[in-house]
Structures are given as structure tokens and as C-alpha cells.
Amino acid sequence: MHWATPQERRSLGQARRKQVGRQQHSELKPKARQASALELVARSMRGRIPAFIQLKYLLMAASPFGYFRGAVPVMAADLSVLPSTGIVCQLCGDAHVRNLGAYAAPDGRLTFDINDFDETIRGPFEWDLKRMAASLVLAGRASSHKESAIRETVVRFVARYAAQMRAFARMPILEVGRFQVHRLGQVEPVLDALLKAERATPLHTLNQLTEPSSSKPNAPRHFKEIKPTLTRVTGRQATAVLAALGPYCQMLEPQRQHLLSLYRPVDVAFKVVGTGSVGLRDYCVYFEGNGPNDPLFLQIKEEPASGYAPYLPDAAPPHQNGQRVAEGQKAMQVQSDPFLGWTHIAGRDYLVRQLNDHKGSIDLEDLEGGGLEAYAEVCGELLARGHARSGDPLILSGYIGSGDGFAEALAKFGTAYADQTEKDWKELKSSAYASKKR
């Protein structure tokens, strides 16, 4: 085995510029699609609950950004026909401005990071950057920014990613693994998310999602019925969901197993979440620990294959997709949910995690004014950290270099892909898929 020196690793990244020049990342080839955007989205609906498919189409038809959130399979296909650097790391897979948020770390402190990994997979690092760049353009347009300001925002995002990656390349490897971003509270959209997370306590979730089962004093609580987004699950289906906690517990660390053993499951519900996940099976289990004021909510979320999997055959996991998501999340995050794990129900793969434990995300309205540019830099820094933890910062920084050509190219790509997304969105809106009568 050859043990590469730091210079050899950096040179490897520089050599990849011959494979794909940094300016080439501005390219987009929509005519190279082997299927239409509508067909690609329709294929992704296979296996989902038929009653909710129309709801997903309506959410996607609501706005270009809503469409973008639900159209990962379309962008995966579009990226797959472009030249690739072949520099691989763990991809978030669905890098967009609303896919970062605040949550409680294992030590109870609030942190802010990438927080949704349904599409995570190992692949070319630039795919995450291109998706985030397009999302910044769409978010900028939705929050009434000028095109020139939006373009500069994307440049700042990539420049911050590049600067942070160069810093990681100079740091001891173990320090990269535990690097913390300390200026997050100074960025207004992030501060807003942290304040939302501070309010999102387990007791707040208890009041939001559950109600007393009767009018009697101290009556036990159960999930509310808020159709179609929240529906109680009973009988065989509830039994199957609770049975899936057995295999899940076995994969947890012993200390987490012990903590969970002190909680008692009280009720089960089906919950509709997000945009991309609508139509998938998503269950919530309400537990009580030391009485009714000690609730715990676990989400058991169906995980199909990543939308990138057809184009990255070497990255296809030999295990189930819940495990793919949990391991991808741990690879990119410094601190992850202590109850993160996986299980299966009726031959389907599921991720298990806490639901709404001090979680808070940003809204597009939060990005108005100067918020967009400052937030874009945070996106660059956090994405760089995730890629450095799961890839090689020397190779990555070697490829990116110190100039601004890479950032300028990605800004052009982000604009072009946002334009294409708006075309695809209009096509969806005018199609039978988005008709409420369908």
C-alpha cells in the first residue's frame, strides 16, 4: 500500500483540473436529458402512497423553490450528464438554503448545521455546490433581490467554501473532524432559526401534536387528528411500527439503549412531512418517561434509494437506505441526534430520529435584505466542513485553487439552473399532474 504524502494529495486535486477545468462548471445541458422532467418526477413517485401523490405535486406547483425541493431526481439526472471531477466525498444530496437548521446537540446545546440527509450518498463534491448555488438564486428571487446581488451572493458562497477548505487543508486532521463554526449567532437568519429551536421543546411538541384522550382531569394524552397531515395509527399497523423499534434498539449504542428503555410508548401516528418526502411512510411514536411532563417523540421515516443512486452505481450501499442516511449524516455532522438509527417495516427501509427536539429552520422571508449574503457564507462554511470531514481537504483545495474562476463558474451555473427550474415548474403547473381534479 502506498501512503500518500500531503503534497501528493494536493497534486492529485490539481491534476483533476485536466479532467474538468474549473470554468467548465458553468455548463448545463438540459437537452441531454434522457427523459423529461415530468417523467423523472413521476418515476420517483413509484411505491409512494397513492393518496398523497397529488399533494406532493400541488406543493411542488406552488412556487419554483417548492418545485426545486421536490425535484432532486431531475437535478440528479441533469448533473449526471455533465463532466465530473471524480473527487468524491459524502454528499448531503439535497443541499439547499432550507436544508440547514438548528437542533439540540447530545450535550443539550443548540447547534446549526445541515440537517436533512434523505438523498445523501458518496459522489462528486461539486454536485452539492451546484445544487446549493441554484437554491440561492431561487431563494434570492423569491425574497426580491436583484439579479446582480444574487449572483454576488453565489460567488460569496463558493468563495467562503473555498477559503474554508484551504484552511482545513492546513489544519491537523483531528481538528478538522471537530471544527466548530463560532460566528453563527451573528448571522440574523441563523439567529432566527436558533430562537425558533429554543422554543421547540419536547413540551411544546407535546402541546402541538397531542391532546387529552378525555375531559377527565389528568387524562392520558394521544396524538391529535389533523388530517391529512397527522393521523392516529392503531391496530396492526401500530403494532408493526412498535415492533420495528426492536431491531432499531439493537443498533443503538448501549447507553442510548438504556435511555430509551426508560421511556414507554404511548401512541403512534402517521405524519406528512416536507415536500420531497410527501407520499412516503412516516410515523411518529409518542413516549413518556418520568410522567406526562417527560415526553419523547421518535420519527420513523421511510427512506427509498437516493435520487443519485442510478448515476453512482459504485456508491450504492450494500445495506438498507435508513442506514445509508444515518451514516451519511454522522459523516458530515460534528454532532448528531443521539437517537439516530434505522429499522425496517414490511420490507421497507426506515430512518429513526427524534422529532422536533429543539429544531428550527429558516424561512425564505428571513433572507430578505442583507440576510441572504450573510447566510450564503454560512452555507459555504458548513458545506465545506461536511465535505472535509468525509473527503480529503487537500485534494479538494488542490482542485479549487486560490482564484475566483471556480466561484464565477458556479454562479453562472446557479443562474442557468434556476432558469431551467422555472421552466420545469411552469411545465408542471400547466400539466395534468398539478390539477386538483386529477
Image (spheres, helix red, strand yellow):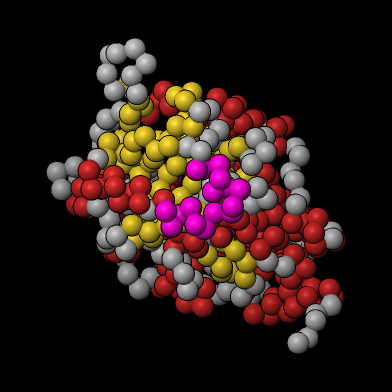
Q: Position of residue 371 (x, y in %)?
A: 62, 34
Residue situated furthest bottom in the rendering:
1
Question: Is residue 250 in the magenta section?
Answer: yes
Question: Is residue 88 in the magenta section?
Answer: no
Q: Could one spot residue 86 in this view of the protein?
A: yes
Compared to 415, does 123 lie above or below? Answer: below
Q: Position of residue 424 (x, y in %)?
A: 35, 55
Left or right: residue 266 compared with residue 331: left
Considering depth in this image, is 145 or 323 the residue closer to the camera? 323
Left or right: residue 227 compared with residue 211: left
Q: Quadrant of residue 373?
A: top right
Write down the region rendered in magenta: 246-261
Residue situated furthest left in the rendering:
437
Left or right: residue 235 compared with residue 388: left
Q: Could one spot residue 154 in this view of the protein?
A: no
Q: Position of residue 147 (x, y in %)?
A: 56, 44
Q: Residue at the location (33% across, 39% down)? A: 268
Q: Residue at the location (71% across, 61% down)? A: 388
Q: Residue at the location (31% across, 41% down)? A: 270
Compared to 278, does 332 lie above or below? Answer: below
Q: Position of residue 7 (x, y in %)?
A: 85, 75
